[in-house]
Amino acid sequence: MFTGNLVIDTILVYLPAMVSNATPTFIRRGTPLDKGKIFIDGRRVLGDGKTIEGLIVGIYFGFIVSLSYTIVLGHYILALQLLASSLGALIGDIIGSFIKRRMGIPRGGRALVLDQLDFYLGANALLLASGFKINIWIFLVGAIIVLVLHIITNRVAYMLGLKNVPW
Ligand code: CTP
Ligand code: MG
């Protein structure tokens, strides 16, 4: 698509979404998006892990990263499509938390598949909506990269003492 190398092209397509998903982690405490509100099931709507600051940081860094290479590629429409993917990643992550709370899983609790792929599906949904044609191979290789990176980064964060659990 861009370089002809499947792995490099996949990284170029999903890097802004991955950055938007990862950078909010540096916000340890912020203003909860749900303002502390309780849903009809008696549990938090989203929980303290989804903040306004995290949303801003995620969009900001996702956009900086996408601009840095879409300008080099001279592909300005792609810059907007990747911005959409960043937004989609953050929205997907928020929807993931909403579902986790409805399942009774507390903030930071483990939800297999949902934890790893919520942002990825959100990014793909908005990429498609922005008119970006997603190649099936790029989608599949991207999903594998996301799953592997998730395992590695969480283990490293656990070993460094940044996280209390290795997932
Ligand atoms: N974060 C944030 N705002 C967001 C997304 C993430 O502030 N919109 C920060 C929070 O500090 C969060 C951390 O990034 O704890 C890691 O994100 P994530 O793993 O998605 O949140 P969890 O704490 O695991 O919460 P949840 O169970 O709701 O997924
Ligand atoms: Mg989590």
Image (cartoon, rainbow, N blue to C red):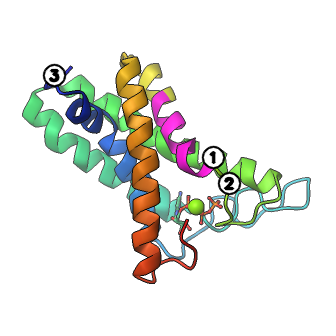
The CA distance from mark 1 to mark 2 is: 6 Å
Asked whether the residues under the numbered discs 3 and 1 touch, taking CB atoms below 8 Å apart as contact, a structural biologist would say no
Looking at this rendering, what residue extends furthest in the right direction?
Answer: 41
Q: Quadrant of residue 157?
A: bottom left
Q: Amino acid at mark 1?
A: Leu
Mark 2 crowd level (few <14, some 14–19, many ≥20, 10 Å Cα): some
Horizontal and vertical percent position of residue 19: 35, 52
Does ligand 1 reach within 8 Å of label 2's beta carbon?
Answer: yes
Q: Which mark is residue 4?
A: 3
Q: Crowding at label 1, few (<14), some or many (≥20) Cα neighbours within 10 Å?
A: some
Quarter residue 8 falls in: top left
Q: Nearer the viewer, residue 18 or 140?
A: 140
Q: Which residues are magenta?
A: 114-124
Residue 91 on the magenta segment: no
Vertical arrangement, residue 59 with respect to residue 163, above or below: above
Q: Residues within 10 Å of mark 3 (few under 14, many from 20)?
A: few
Residue on which the image places disc 2: 111
Secondary structure category for the residue under label 2: loop
Looking at the rendered structure, the secondary structure element under dot 3 is: loop
